[in-house]
Image (cartoon, grey):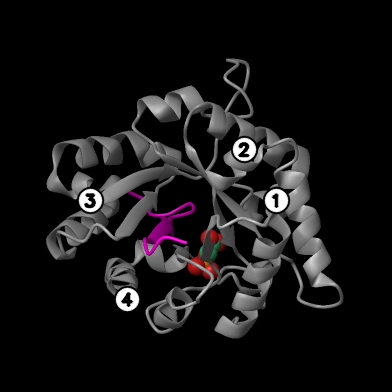
Amino acid sequence: MSNKKYVIGNWKALPNSQAEVDQILDFLSEHLPSGDTETSIVVCPPFVYLEEVSKILATTSLGTRVELGAQDIALSDEPSQTGEVTGEQLARLGVRYVIIGHSDRRWKLGESDEITNAKLRMALQHNLTPIVCIGERVREGNFGKDIIDQIDATFAGASSDQIQSCVIAYEPVWAISTNPGAKPDTPESAQQSIQIIRDHLKSDIRMLYGGSVNPKNAEAFLGLPNASGVLVGGASVRPEDFLQIIRAAM
Ligand code: PGA
């Protein structure tokens, strides 16, 4: 496992204006320490801001520190997909990563394993690095089997090289801050689940933890011996919080 750490911000459906996007990026631009190449920082804004963020990253020094990710990808490059954004369009915008199988999409928007798997293939086809979210809805009974079944369905048909090129974010659904009744996870239980995934895939794939990561717990989750970073939701649109999490990774 390389020493490189990843801090990836999933902005979800926030913020509500380009002015707020500018504030987040201006803040990062002013405060991000330069010269650290061991920490990859990625922001995944809603589609509506991707083009503007892409321009800002392409034309300012922030682009040397921060890479662009998308939160979703269309099932194919066919034009008859009202409301979707294709891999081709994302790649043209300079997007490098795409979140696949986020629990919001799996459980709130009804995305099946088949759809998630098709989106994974599209991301790979366009040379976008998939950030594949995996996580059990409840931690009881044989939750390890739920994790393994989800992995097998999500990666069905992918070669071991393709799997190796992905980033997996282990995100226990019950610990995600925006879910009703969310309970904090512990580094010990996160480590156990991440190990279940590693043992199953028999690979040193890049693995992140994501479940209410915030400035208080970031150091503990970033210190997990079998993971290389964090996928941050709510805290990634709070610039000071996101910066503190990034600093904890350095
Ligand atoms: P959270 O979200 O950090 O707000 O819990 C993580 C995610 O849903 O990716």
Mark 4 Cα-neighbour bin, 10 Å: few <14, some 14–19, many ≥20 = some
Q: Position of residue 239 (x, y in %)?
A: 28, 66
**What is the secondary structure assignment of the residue under circle 3?**
helix
Q: Is mark 1 within 8 Å of ligand 1?
A: no
Looking at marks 2 and 3 on the same chain, the residue that comes earlier in the sequence is marked by 3
Q: Which mark is residue 120?
A: 2
In magenta, the rendered stretch is 1-17
Question: Residue at coordinates 66% horizontally, 77% vertically from top-left?
Answer: 192
Query: Which of the two discs, 2 and 1, labels the residue nearer the N terminus?
Result: 1
In the rendering, which numbered label is found on residue 248? 4
Would residue 158 appear left or right of 43 to someone viewing this image? right
Along the line of sight, which residue is nearer the eye, 164 or 89?
Answer: 164
Label 3 environment density (alpha carbons within 10 Å; few <14, some 14–19, many ≥20): some
Q: Amino acid at mark 2?
A: Leu
Which circle's residue, 4 or 2, is located before the other in the chain?
2
Which of the two residues, 19 or 248, is positioned nearer the viewer here? 248
Query: Residue tagged by mark 3?
Result: 22
Q: Position of residue 25 (x, y in %)?
A: 23, 54
* Image label count: 4
Task: Calculate the distance from the C-alpha at mark 4 to the C-alpha at mark 3.
Answer: 24 Å
Judge whether residue 10 is colored magenta. yes
Name the residue that disc number 1 marks.
106
The answer to whether residue 2 is magenta is yes
The first of marks 4 and 3 along the sequence is 3
* Element under disc 4: helix
Chain-order first, disc 4 or disc 1 = 1
Q: Mark 2 and mark 4 in contact (Cβ < 8 Å)?
A: no
Query: Which residue is drawn at the image coordinates 16% and 65% (left, top)?
Result: 33
